[in-house]
Amino acid sequence: MRFSVAHRSVGFVALWIVGLCAVVTRGAPPEIASIAVFPDKIELTGREATHRVLVTGLTADGREVDLTRTASYAIADDKTAAVDASGMIRSLGDGTTTLTVTAGKHQAKVSLTVKRPPATQPVSFAREVMPVLARAGCNAGACHAKQGGQADFQLSVFAFDLDSDYNAIVKGGRGRRIFPAAPAESLLLKKPTAAVKHGGGRRFERDSKPYRMVLRWLEQGAPQTPVDEPMLVGIEVFPAERAYTPESTQQLLVRARYSDGQVRGVTAEVQFSSNIEEIAEVDEHGLMTVGKLTGETELVVRYMGEVAVSFVTVPIEHAVPDSAYTALPRNNFIDGLVYAKLNKLGMLPSSRCTDGEFIRRASLDAIGVLPTPDETRAFLADADPDKRDKLIDRLLEQPAYADHWAVKWGDLIRANPVRIGVKGVFMLDRWLRQSFAQNKPYDQFAREILTSQGSTHKHGPVTLWRDRRDPTERTTLVSQIFLGVRMECAKCHHHPNEKWSQTDFYQLAAYFGRLERKGAGIAPPISPGEEFFYHTPGGSVKHPVSGEVMAPTPPDGTPSEIPDGRDPRHLLVDWMVQPENPFFAPAIVNRVWAEFMGRGVVDPVDDFRASNPPTNGPLLAALARDFVQAKYDLKHLMRTIMRSQVYQLSSTPNEHNVRDTRNFARSYRRRLPAEVMLDAVSDVVGPRLRLDGLAAGARAIGTWNHRLDSHFMNAFGRPDRSSDCPCERNTDTSVIQALHLMNAEQLNERIADKNGRAAKLAGDERPIGAILEELYLTAYSRIPTKEEIEIATGVFEEPDATRQSATEDVMWALINSAEFVFNH
């Protein structure tokens, strides 16, 4: 039979897209019961120092409303300071005075002290010059901080290397950027003011504060920052967290803290951005404007390499009473923490998924296998209220569990046969499967990988070092997989989105500096070459710029003291597995959570940073704490997640959570991974595809080498482990996938195979309804609806249809539906 798209466009395959538009009715402005001004005491130090205030109104029902730009301001002594209509205060002369803030019938006072430095005090390159250049974007990644710089002028990203920046400005280009004899004629001023041609355009105006600051510094002879000057230790943004109504505004305030205890207002000098501008956007002055959509986002503030975040929540305006959340079922601590976040958003979770949805979802997530029709029938008929918990326990004891999770970790460790040889790939794969079959504690699992040594032909984890031959390559992999931190950028320069410097990167790399090797070296794919890796004293890692020998130091930690003869890698793992470690346990529980829930609490799962905070910090912390208390038991973690009511929610949205994509108010539909998808198709059609390198009848989740040929798995996102680095699979759908399912000759042949499921069902004496039930149970783990039976029965009644052709057509249609392709 010829299988065409037109022939198989049967009526019961449909895609429903549900949209929900929320209409927001805005009433009169809320009545303000009281106001609060922050801060209530301000000290202005430095030249042309500025500091803004925030005015917050508290309504009778407890809501906070920003009044900063609608309040009025008056300073008692206008020779000491001035204030503009937005609440920005500017120093004028030494002294103490009072700022009076008026909002409606309410007033508040702020104490002001101004201490201006003497005119002879040098302008600080670090505290005064570089912040204005950074605010102008001069050291942004798209300008002079990009690799190689711009126009032979390179600055460090976010001013992380001030000495290098000073040399580039003052001494670089043969000193042509500054003109000490006529400071106002310096290119450092003429380019950003567009007095001469500048590829970056005008960055600030003549006689502006940035212009005056740089000019004064040049007039003083461009002094370098004194070595004893107080250092910046961090920044903070206010409000740090707040709920808003649609189309409201909020002024942000930013302060910098220094090592001498001084606090400076730097709102006018920082850079603002929003992670989701559709929810809220923020301008260069720190004025946030909320859009019409509900949800949440983060406003990111950057200043001289430091990062702070303001959390924005825009709840759904139609109120949901607290009693609605109290009444929700709770299976474990996960549910309460997720509900608390949903309550804050005014969002109700979806209802509980059906038993058919649960058995299919849990089986695919835990072991990568579709439940059989008999398993589904038994589960649907079981009246035991604990049957879901018992199913979870059974699934986690299935042999397929080890295969399924070994494939996932094979992606992460990225064993590339071109570099390590086929035997090395096989040994690593076998070790992974054995580790998961034993339910090896995760801390032990990590230690055996990271401290491995010996022969690449005898011990699988050693192949990691054969593939990652340099300490810097090992650092990138270890930080990303085991710590959830992307430090690779810091290999060449300060991380553009985080605090990590080159020093941080090479101090971590120093743990791998004493790992030596001998043997055949990198092998071609079929080479029997064997290589040995071992620890030897004396190896070191040097900073690429300063040449300094790096002391092994964990991120945000103190240098490790290495006893004579001890392998530093053991000390790294010792630090990792400490219960209070902020990286190790959160990174793996977040990764496992994402596998079961479709999205990490931190997303992407390996990108923990201040500017990419968790969507539910208390949830992530509780999961990590429970995981550590369970002695790093991965099955315990999975069981905890799967038993939660949150995991068991329906994927069908309700009016509250239709826009939710990050707070787990419903189950997120996920396309099946390549190996799981191929096995699922085989389970439906009957004949199992023979795969190179595997025994006859083996499942695709037994695949141990990405170079084993499979057009199907390549189409469905199997990563190429020779690339650097796949880490997380691409889970998007594509036209290629759709065409493959619809038209692939090999798949059509398997559907029509005389030994396949369609032929066996059609050849039985069973009625059409029983055939359809078997197909639906196999593909969807549910009984077909009355409407589906009527439509599908019509396929059998078409004039030229036979039982065989009609069964094949229904099977084809089920495989080509979203309900089959997605776990839901």
Image (cartoon, helix red, strand yellow):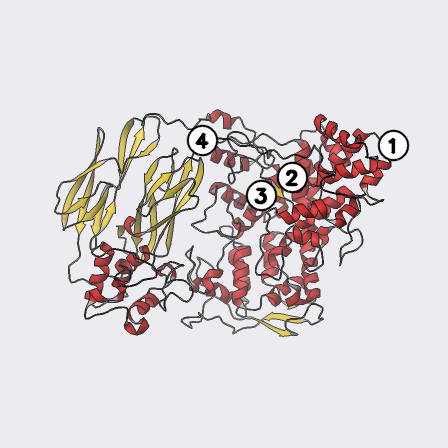
Q: Nearer the viewer, mark 4 or mark 2?
A: 2
Three-letter amino acid code of the residue under disc 3: Gly
Mark 3 or mark 4, earlier in chain: 4
- Locate residue 351, reporting x and y percent: 58, 29
Three-letter amino acid code of the residue under disc 4: Ile
Real-space CA distance between mark 4 and mark 2, rounded to the nearest whole angstrom: 30 Å
Real-space CA distance between mark 2 and mark 3, rounded to the nearest whole angstrom: 16 Å
Q: Residues within 10 Å of mark 2 (few under 14, many from 20)?
A: some
Q: Residue at x 76, y 56 (%)?
A: 694
Q: Which mark is residue 598?
A: 3
Query: Marks 1 and 3: CB-CB under 8 Å?
Result: no
Three-letter amino acid code of the residue under disc 1: Glu
Q: Nearer the viewer, mark 1 or mark 3?
A: 1
- Locate residue 728, reporting x and y percent: 58, 52
Real-space CA distance between mark 3 and mark 4, rounded to the nearest whole angstrom: 23 Å
Of helix, strand and loop, which one carries label 3?
A: loop
Left/right placement of residue 627 relative to residue 203 reads right
Q: Residue at x 74, y 28 (%)?
A: 789
Left/right placement of residue 236 relative to residue 430 reads left
Of helix, strand and loop, which one carries label 2?
A: helix
Real-space CA distance between mark 1 and mark 2, rounded to the nearest whole angstrom: 31 Å
Q: Is residue 321 visible?
A: yes
- Locate residue 700, reporting x and y percent: 72, 51
Left/right placement of residue 378 relative to residue 494 reads right
Of helix, strand and loop, which one carries label 4?
A: loop
Q: Which residue is mark 2?
A: 818
Q: Which residue is mark 1?
A: 765
